[in-house]
Every structure is written in C-alpha cells, then in structure tokens.
Amino acid sequence: MKKRALITILIALFALAVVVNAQAPFRVAIVAPSSVTDLAWTQAMYDALGQVQESMGGEGAMEIAYTEGMFDVTAAAQALRDYAEDGYNLVIAHGTQYGTSLFELAPDYPDTSFAWGTASDTGAGQGLTNVFAYEASAEEGGYINGVMAGLMTESGVVGIVGPVPAGDALLYINGFQQGVHASNPGAQILLAYTGSFGDTAAAAETAQTQIAGGADVLTGSAQQVVGAIDAAQTAGAVWFGTQFDQSGNWAETVVSSQVFDWTATLEDMIAQIQSGTLGGTAYNLTLANGGLTFAYGQVAIPDDVRAAADQAVADVAAGIAYPLGGLPEGQFRVALVAPSSVTDLAWTQSMYSALTEMQQQLGGEGAMEIAYTEGMFDVTAAAQALRDYAEDGYDLVLAHGTQYGTSLFELAPDYPETAFAWGTATDTGADQGLTNVFAYEARAEEGGYINGVVAGLMTESNVIGIVGPVPAGDALLYINGFQQGVAASNPEAQILLAYTGSFGDTAAAAETAQTQIAGGADVLTGSAQQVVGAIDAIQTAGGYWFGTQSDQSANWPDTVVASQVFNWTPVVGSMIESIVSGSVGGTAYELSLSNGGLTFAYGQVEIPEEARAAADQATTDIASGAIVVQQELPE
C-alpha cells in the first residue's frame, strides 16, 4: 500500500513538473553595444523583443533580460556566457564585433540558441548547429532616403555623418549615396566618419562642419546620430534616419526613417527553437519581405518627392533598381562589346541602358567609365576588342552575344583578375576551371507568352506574323513563348513564322513583314535589332506590333502595343558588387517576371479591357508558377 502511495505521489510530482515546465516562460537575453533607448540599432531590436513578448502573452510567457552599453568585447563575451550558463533559451549578441566570442562560446552550450548580427554566418562551416544570424539590407532604405534627399536639397549639398565604415552603417551610406546620384546627379555629397558608433559629440561636430560647408540635408547611422540630428535641427536643416523611427523626437526635422523591424525574425527563431531547431538560419531584412519599413515625421514632403520615393520603393522591392552594399573605390571601368548599335532599340540598347543607369546611381562618369565597341558581327574582330579591353585593365568586360562564348573562354584564362560576362548563357566556365566569368540570360519566353495572349485577343483578321532573326538564344525563347500565348488566348489564330537569317538586316525584316501582312496578318512581332524595318512596315499597314528586349513604344507609340523590356541593371549591379568584394565570376544570372528583370512598357494603343485583364492574369500565373511557359516547342 505504501509502495502504491509512493508511486502515486511520484506520478503527481512528475505531472506537476511537466505543467510547471510547460508554463515556464521562454527566456531571451540580449547583449548590446548601446542603450535600449538609443533611437537606433539597439532599440530597434529591444522594441521588437517587446512586441514579440506582448504577442506571446506578456512577461509570463516570455522573459527579456538585457545588458546594454557593451562596447568592451571582453565584457560582452562574459555577459553572453553568464546568460547561457543561467539557462536562457535564446542569447542574442547584437553586434558584429561579438562574432568571434560567440563562436568560441556556442560549442560549450549546445542546448542554448545564440544569434548575432549583422551577419550571415551561422557557423555551419565550423560544425555549429545552435547559431542564428541576421542582417539588414540597409542599402535599400538608404537608396530611398537618398532619392528624397537629392530632390529636397536646395543648396545642392548633402551631408553624411558616418560612424565606422562597417556593417549596416556602411550598407546604408552606400545606398544613400546611390539614391542621391540617381535623383540629383549634380548634388555634392560630404561624407565623414566619426570613428565611433556612440560619440554623440563627435557626430554633432561633424554635422556642424557639413552644415557650414553648405549642407541643408543630412543623414547618418548608429546611436551617435542624436548629436547630429540636434545640430541639423538647430541649423534648420532636415534629416533622414535609419534603424529606428527618429521622427518621434525630432518631428519637424526628420523627413523619414528607415525602420528595422526584427519582429518576424525573432518570431521565426523562437518557433524554430521551440520545435527543436536551435540554429542554422540566416535572416535578412528587405523592403520586399517587409523587414524594412518607413516612418515619416511632420516635415512637408513635396508631392513629386513622395512619388519618387514610392516609385523607388517599388523598383527596389521588384529588383528594378539595385542599390549596392559595397561601392567601388575609385573609378570602376566597364567595357561592352556588342553585335549592334547601342541605340538599336533592342538587344544591345537594353544592356547599354542598364550600364548608364548604374553609372548614374554610382555618381556619374567620375565613378564609372563605360566604353563600348558596337556592330561586332565579326566574331574574330569582337575577340580582339575583348582582349584589348582586358589588356587595358577594365574591371568588367561584357561580351554581349552568345556567339562570343568560344572566344571568351579562350581569353579569360589570360586575364585571371579581369571579370568577364557573356549572354545569353548560363555557362560560367566552372567546368573548365574558370573563376572569372559571369553569365546572364533572359527568360524571354515569359514575356513572349504575355505578348502572345494579348496579340491573340487583338487580331481581327485572325492572322499573326512573327519576324524572327535566327532561331537561337533569347529570340527563339521569345518566339516560342509568343506562340504559346497566342494558342492560349486564341487557338484558332493562324501564325505566320519566318526567319530572316540575320539579327540586323532591317530590309529583310521589312520584306518579311510585308509578306506576312499581304498574307492577312494585322498583328506582328519579332526580335533583335532587325525589327526596325518590320515595325515601319506594320505601321504603314495600320496594324499592331508587340516588341521585346527594349521599349519600342517610344518610337512607334501608335503601333507598338507592348514591349517586353530586359532590365539588366540589377545584373550589372550584382556583378559590380561581387567584383568589389573580390569575386570576379562564377555566377549565372537570369531575368524573369518574378524577379523584376522582365517588365513591360506600353505605347498609346488602346488595349481592350479583356486583353489587359488576360495579360495581368497571365503575368501573375507565370510569376507564381501556375503557368509554365515551355522554352522549346515540339517540331
């Protein structure tokens, strides 16, 4: 009997322990370099913890402990160890400078989850399984703020009060500079680093110096900025902030603040920990995933400035604009070798336009040199041009044509420190041991499908012509996609397809188009620089055209219904950033509807509501994967 009673008691105690353990709060500790009320880096994380705590049910569900002002890395390491020793579920090292200490500490506490930022290394390469990493693409919001700053400065001088050129501070400052250059290429930027994240007096002094130099718009990063914003307010200047909403304290001085929202990051970490996964994920805040948001003060923002900011947000989120986290030191030199003119309204112009767009973002000709050799149909001559540019020390040499691939692969090994790129292609030469070649291509069949859907609904004769150049590359992809789109919206339509055998013979394209028009076609499409002749022909006949590669509606607004546009700007930007960081090749890039590399431009042709709705639906379905456009058609 006594034995049974003892067992009953033990079972009851075990059940009680389970209940107590189930009700025990989730314990989070944060070690940070500055105050949890710093209006910047630390407060952004601390406030996010508070929001998560509230959503979980309050202090009874989640305990938060913190150690602030930990500029001493050794002291911070001890604080991290103390929290781990005390059994906290998640210990956050909120500073890049704590990384070495964290990686030494984590193996000693395999049942404790650690997190650190800004960083992307979870320690997997060292065998760690209990470390999360987090970072913010601060250059994105920096770009938006820069666009506004460039438009709002009256003096034409903008000041940047930097802390230390590292981490998200450097990302933000680099993006900000690009934004200013994009909206106001003539603006002067005064950039100075104080050498400290927290020296408010130094930040104030730096800001005052920049104001004395003519700056009427300022920005900066880290907890030091309190001093700089005070200086801007005293001088009647305006401020753009980052990390935290600074408009609450300086409502009439702070125009906008990029806000780091770590809430979703923390929620996912906690959910993973509770399910038994203690690390291994690297998080990143972006405009697209909602981790970066904007808060505005009471400063009056002109309508055109706000519109430019909204457009920039949309462009960055969609990948149309590409702020760089790392900027080149000195002038970055790019050379382009292409088969046709940089004003061909097609293949070559699409890349040249991307180069000039990135040049403007980086600060103009002084920041980025662009050289080009056009009309290179002769592959042998093109190979020599590529070699000449490499020999002359260009940082990036673009072989803008699939036909140049063989020459490029023979050339690249001779110049291992020069980055080369070619397209349309996916082969970076890795199988041949090359490490200095990028490749790029466009999923042209996607936009071809969209154009085909609309063409099928707009033809009145039920005959559609396609003026192809050579059945290869993105031209073939586009034509195949276009045919699938026509078949989807108008299965009864007749398609007249003919190839001219040339990318650039405008006379042959015109003749082919005229033959198709004589055969009843009232809607035409085609690819490559030859199409100028074909569009003239369909315009004369009073029909419609659908374009690809570049915006052709500007030259024939009453004839061109829509143009699929290749936006290579993010590709060029990514290549430059990779080169600046020390990697001169190895990546294959792709333009698609889902990543914003393929966009549409429209002319003045009135598109029936039914056709426009069908195009929008097809775009959504392709981007989501509901429609898969085949790259090859059965023979």
Image: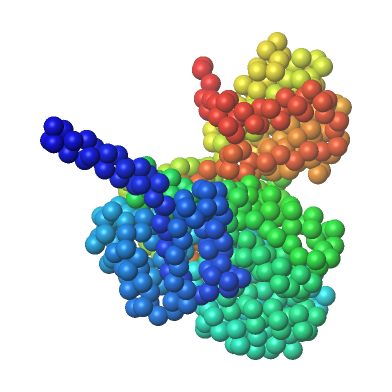
Q: Position of residue 389 (x, y in %)?
A: 51, 63
Q: Please indicate whether residue 412 sits to the left or right of residue 369 in the image.
A: left
Q: In which quarter of the image is residue 372?
A: bottom right
Q: Which of 65 and 519 is in front in this view?
A: 65
Q: Residue at x 81, y 43 (%)?
A: 555
Give the residue at x 13% y 32%. Answer: 1
Identify the residue at the far front of this view. 1
- The answer to whether residue 249 is left or right of residue 74 is right
Q: Can residue 170 be seen in this view?
A: no
Q: Position of residue 77 (x, y in %)?
A: 34, 72
Q: Position of residue 553 (x, y in %)?
A: 79, 40
Quarter holding residue 365:
bottom right
The image quarter containing residue 70 is bottom left
Along the viewing direction, whichever of 570 and 298 lies nearer the viewer:
298
- Which of the pair 609/251 is nearer the observer? 251
Q: In this view, does 138 lie above or below 609?
A: below
Q: Which residue is drawn at 53% across and 78% down?
A: 197
- The reply to whether residue 566 is visible in this rendering is yes
Left/right of residue 18 with respect to residue 152 in the rendered view: left
The image's colour scheme reads rainbow
Q: In this view, does 389 lie above or below 379?
A: below
Farthest-out residue, top:
492
| 311 to 470, vertically: above or below | below
Side of 162 relative to 455 (left or right): left
When the figure is inspected, residue 114 is found, relative to residue 37, above or below; the finding is above
Residue 122 in the image: x percent, y percent?
A: 36, 56
Q: Nearer the viewer, residue 547 or 279?
A: 279
The residue located at (71%, 28%) in the rendering is: 615
Number of marks in the image?
0
